[in-house]
Amino acid sequence: MKKFKKIARWIGLVVALAVVAIAIGFKIYTSKYYRADEDTISGIETRLDIKVNSYADDRGMVFLPEEETPRAVIVFYPGGKVEYSAYSGLMYEIASRGYICLLPRMPENLAFFRINAVDVITSGYMDQVDMVEDLDWYIAGHSLGGVAASLYLEKTSDEYAGIILCASYPNADLSGKNIRLLSVYGSEDKVLNLEKYEESKAFWPKDFEEHVIDGGIHSYFGCYGIQSGDGTPQISNEEQIIKTADIIENWIDG
């Protein structure tokens, strides 16, 4: 019995040490993330300041069109290991065209830890949500954020008009859903796995559009520099953001 208890204690100690090691390793992994390029974002914000009003809390950021009546609502899931505010440049550009944009903050900058982020960011603003419930709602995301958005949409598709994927693809079967899908990626993207992207088309709904931005890269859907392994851009960060907003606007307007 004493020998058994001694072995059990050693096993317990080994397990505890393994858990601690995994936790430390994970914290180190998530602490290395891409931070927002404030200079690029500031330039976009200054240009669109009179057209968009934005505010933030611990749930994320909201972008409201000031000069146009809201036409739709877009909830955007940020890419993996990217500071969520790095996408505020794209949100400003889209909001300036008449769309309410919601940009959720993700735990450890990973959308997989908060797949229901849209519920979290809207939970404190139900009165405001009720005011726009008659508008079409779209869920969107960049890279791994788009994958997470597709998983959320798989269970709640009746509430959304469609999904917008930036350098991403669905990891959920949306082929039988009555929704629209927009896919946008850059011609110089070296991060997006094109083999898996093509395979994912079996999951796409019947109503879809696909656009390739000439000269664009994976990283330039946000403003956080160029991530490791990406291609060489042939256009500027701001140009890609404007082109992306153009494509989204034209697609929603149909």
Image (spheres, helix red, strand yellow):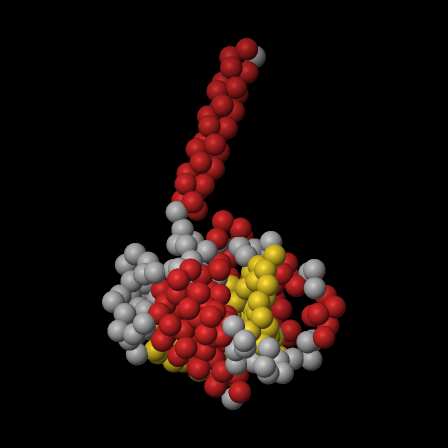
Question: Residue 125, position in %: x, y?
Answer: 70, 64
Along the line of sight, which residue is nearer the eye, 239 or 143? 239
Along the line of sight, which residue is nearer the eye, 137 or 4? 137
219 sits to left or right of 176 = left
Residue at the (54%, 64%) spot, across then down: 103
Question: Residue 156, position in %: x, y?
Answer: 62, 69
Residue at the (47%, 69%) spot, across then down: 45
Along the line of sight, which residue is nearer the eye, 94 or 77? 94
User: Is residue 172 at all visible to an observer of this figure?
Assistant: no
Question: Residue 19, position in %: x, y?
Answer: 48, 33
- Say which quarter of the image contains residue 168: bottom left
Along the line of sight, which residue is nearer the eye, 19 or 189? 189
Looking at the image, the residue that sits furthest to the bottom is: 254
Residue at the (47%, 70%) spot, across then down: 46
135, above or below 141, in the image: below
User: Is residue 20 at all visible to an observer of this figure?
Assistant: yes
